[in-house]
Amino acid sequence: MIYGRRSGVTGQRSNAIIKIAVAGIAIGMTVMLLATSIVAGFQEEIRSKVIGFGSHLQVSLYNPQNTLGAKPMPMEPPFIATLRSVEAVKNVQAYAYKSGIIAANGEIEGVMVKGIDAQFDWSFFEQNMIDGKRLGSSEKANDSVILSKSVLDRLELTLGEKITVSFFQDERERKRRFIIGGVYETGMEQFDGSIILADLRHIQKLNNWDSNQVAGYEVLLKRFEDLPLLDDLIMEYIPYQYTTLKITDQFIDIFGWLELQDLNVFIILGLMILVSGINMISALLVLILERTNMIGLLKAMGAHSTSIARIFLYNAAYLIVSGILIGNILGIGLGWLQKTFQLVKLDQSNYYVDHVPVLFEWSTLFWVNIGSVMACLLMLMIPSLIVSKIDPVKTIKFN
């Protein structure tokens, strides 16, 4: 009776430890999946916003004075049509910049007016447009402009209101009247606080350019992962007299910061795998110690230590897979809820997004699962060596 009660209590304890180990693996897997998906979503959101303002590549004439827009290039040079035919290229669009000052309601605001034409890709700004509409095409220069909500609020302006922008060139002040036709908000204050979209023809007139002259061309790719292809495009298609600037070089601080987020993910993955492995090591040790007598008896009957250890490893592998399966259901389920309903909100002024972004990269999730299983199984080799150290004579004699 005493032995039976001991066996029952011991079994209950081992079952509890095993359940805790499986729960630990499930929680660790949930955290790993959410961490990789959230960081991937955050990187994608920030990258898309930066690229939305500056494209993947800017092409302009080499300008040793480094004066913005001081050396125009001809519109539609021959290599532009070639770039548009490349499969990885989404769009090639002309641009020109002009700095100016808006004065309204007793406030002044320095801005950078970006001139665009009919070939401009509106997909990014349409996603972030909160009021009004995009610039329309017409034979004459469109007087509408698109500015950010932050500029609108600071100057106490409203949609449809007329504004005056002062431009300075050769110590002369030139003013232009515009109408606020649209308002956007991306949360990237370093861009929102200054960038205004206007008709390219206004910038051409302000710079005293001909209608077939622009500051440069922006090259948009279909995928950010195709960015390394730009080096080949530059070497093969773009003449030597033109200079190129990739978005990762133009905003090296932002993209360097995004790359540091990968380090955080690796740290989280390493810690979660370590914790999960320790949980399974503890559970396997309990299983081995609880069945020491059985192991000794099997050895006395001729069973090899490797065969016995394999039995315990198979049992542990089943528990690992069970925990990982539960973790996948929880991780992907919670990620889907956040992605669909945006339940967790963020302060956009600090994080550049107003909610926790989630992006499922299925290849990453696959390797996280495979890596977790392999790492846990490798760590389980350590307690399985205890089986080879068990002496059948002593265990049977003790029994």
Image: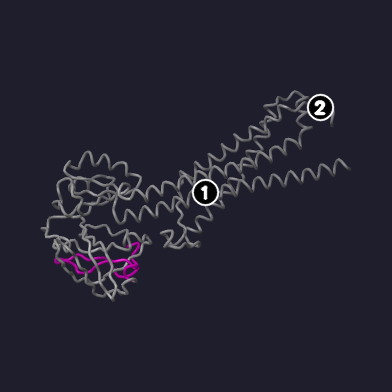
The mark that comes first in sequence, 2 or 1, is: 1
The correct choice, above or below, for 308 with respect to 337 in the image is above
Quarter the C terminus occupies: top right
Residue underneath mark 2: 394
Give me the disc on residue 33.
Answer: 1
Residue situated furthest right in the rendering:
1
Label 2 Cα crowd, 10 Å radius (few <14 / some 14-19 / many 20+): few
Where residue 180 sits, quadrant-wise, is bottom left
At 65% from the left and 32% from the top, the residue drawn is 382
User: On the rendered structure, is 166 left or right of 287?
Assistant: left
Is 110 in front, or is 86?
A: 110
- Percent position of residue 225, x then y: 35, 45
| Residue 112 visible in this rendered orientation of the protein | yes
SS of the residue under disc 1: helix
* Residue 49, quarter of picture: bottom left
Q: Give the range drawn in magenta.
A: 126-152
Residue 341 visible in this rendered orientation of the protein: no
In the rendered view of the protein, which quadrant contains the N terminus? top right
**Left/right of residue 369 with respect to residue 1 in the rendered view:** left
Residue 145, magenta (yes or no): yes
